[in-house]
Amino acid sequence: MEGVKKQKSISKIFAIYIVCFCIVAVLLVVFNFTLFAFGIQTGYILPANYYQQRIEEQRKTIEQAEDVKDLIPQECKYAVYDLNGNMLQGNVSEAKALDMWNIVQSDSRSSGIYFYAVIQRDNGICVVEYMINASFANPILRRNIRNVEIASYIFLFSLFAIEIIIFSKFFKRRLVKEMKILKDTTENIQMENLDFKIEYSNIVEINDILGALDKMKLELKEALAKQWNMEEMRKEQIAALAHDIKTPLTIIKGNSELLDELDLKPDQAEFNNNILNEIKNMESYIKSLIEIMKSEKECVLEKRQINFIKFIDYIVEQGTLISINKQLKFKSEAKDIPKCILVDEESLKRSIINVISNAVDYCPIDGEILFSVNSNDRSIEFIIEDSGRGFTKEELNYATEEFFQGDKSRTSKNHYGMGLYITKKLIEKNNGNIYLDNSEKLGGAKVILKILV
């Protein structure tokens, strides 16, 4: 595989990320404890036994002082008792004082998270309740964060969570970058763009898939090339056959026309007229075949800016001329149309005139055809409506397919299901589409040609 310098498996890449994650996690733990130790050394954090030390430092003074309020840290609870257990002074309620007295009388010096210091006095004892946990030296921080150790663990877990998010994003970005190569490859194959060179990934498993896609691309390219060649040969054969049929058909037509000039019996004249009529049908069919071959070969668009108002005038003029023979009323509506548009003029003309010709064929004598143009900033619609029979449900679904003839009562004898098919091919070249409906205004068929601008 060219262009691949170094490949790794997904399991190896995942293992590398796990190792890096663990290393960073250890560093975060070290950082957290270092920060904690630094806080203790600098005095920002008080050690866990800070209050115990303060009490022990003031023990002798507390033994002799009458009022011990200023000798005990504010964060500690205390009570001074006489020998009978009556509270003389303290900063706790009587119920709390009773609990503290019962605890120390049972020779216990702790209860849950609380510890108790017992200081003997001349006529009683002083009991101080404190906790053994680190706290902040700053009074505001100490009041809001009572346990620095728990806060430290929360901070550490927060760092872990951030680390997980960061590593997952990096891992996702790595996989997305590698998977984009696979996505681009499949999209190119889907769009039948088979001349591109596959760019390989740095992941072994993805390269295995890309290798299989590369083989599939080459085989698909060969198959499409064969199919394309066969299709071109088929089109050339059909076009050649259509032209070859013209020669014997011309001879038959000429002989029939010569016979028509003779003094034939009535039944002979009728037979000869039938031959001439069928020759006209065959000529129309051959013409349609040639039109299809021509429309499929004309793949190169020549888009240019055209005067849209003159273009509409031309369509209206042609539509009026086509309608004269059947004494049809040809009306047109065009409001707020742009002055210029960028299109392939010839193919757009052919597609619109083709639909108008179909409408003329299917419209009864003295009927009506309405040609209207609607436009906005993104699209232009050419709408052709007639007062004929209209489309059947089947025709609405399949009338644009090749050789579809549908209801024979609507289809003329000279029609072979090519008109709307050719129109669809032409309008698609102008970045548009064809839509079929029945007209509410005139009661007949309604064809909408919509192009994007």
Image (cartoon, rainbow, N blue to C red):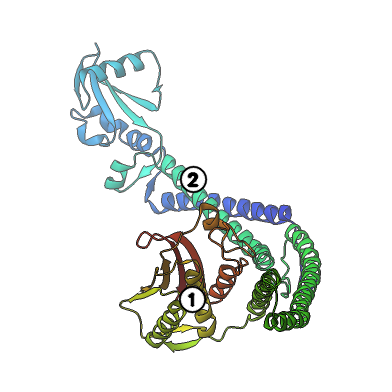
Q: Who's the residue at 61% across and 63% down the image?
A: 401
Residue 318 x/y as whole percent: 45, 83
Q: Who's the residue at 56% across and 68% down the image?
A: 420
Based on the displayed image, in which of its 4 quarters is residue 213 positioned?
bottom right
**CA gap, disc 1 and disc 2:** 71 Å
Crowd band around label 1 with a 10 angstrom C-alpha radius: few (<14), some (14–19), many (20+): many
Q: Which mark is residue 157?
A: 2
Q: Which mark is residue 405?
A: none
Q: Amino acid at mark 1?
A: Ile
Residue 232 x/y as whole percent: 76, 76
Q: Amino acid at mark 2?
A: Phe
Based on the displayed image, in which of its 4 quarters is residue 438 positioned?
bottom left
Instruction: Identify the secondary structure beneath mark 1.
Output: helix
Q: In terms of depth relative to the viewer, which is nearer, 373 or 55?
A: 373
Q: Who's the residue at 50% across and 67% down the image?
A: 434
* Whether residue 124 is visible: no
- The residue sitting at the top extreme is 84
Q: In terms of depth relative to the viewer, which is nearer, 343 or 16?
A: 343
Residue 218 x/y as whole percent: 80, 69
Crowd band around label 2 with a 10 angstrom C-alpha radius: few (<14), some (14–19), many (20+): some
Is 318 located above or below residue 385 in the figure?
below
Quarter of the rendering occupied by the C terminus: bottom left
Tell whether 332 sits left or right of 166. Answer: left
* Whether residue 134 is visible: yes
Residue 237 x/y as whole percent: 79, 76
Mark toward the viewer: 1 or 2 = 1
Tell whether 105 sits left or right of 65. Answer: right
Q: Who's the residue at 73% across and 68% down the image?
A: 200
Instruction: Identify the secondary structure beneath mark 2.
Output: helix
Is 398 located above or below residue 337 in the figure?
above
Quarter of the rendering occupied by the N terminus: bottom right
Q: Which residue is mark 1?
A: 352
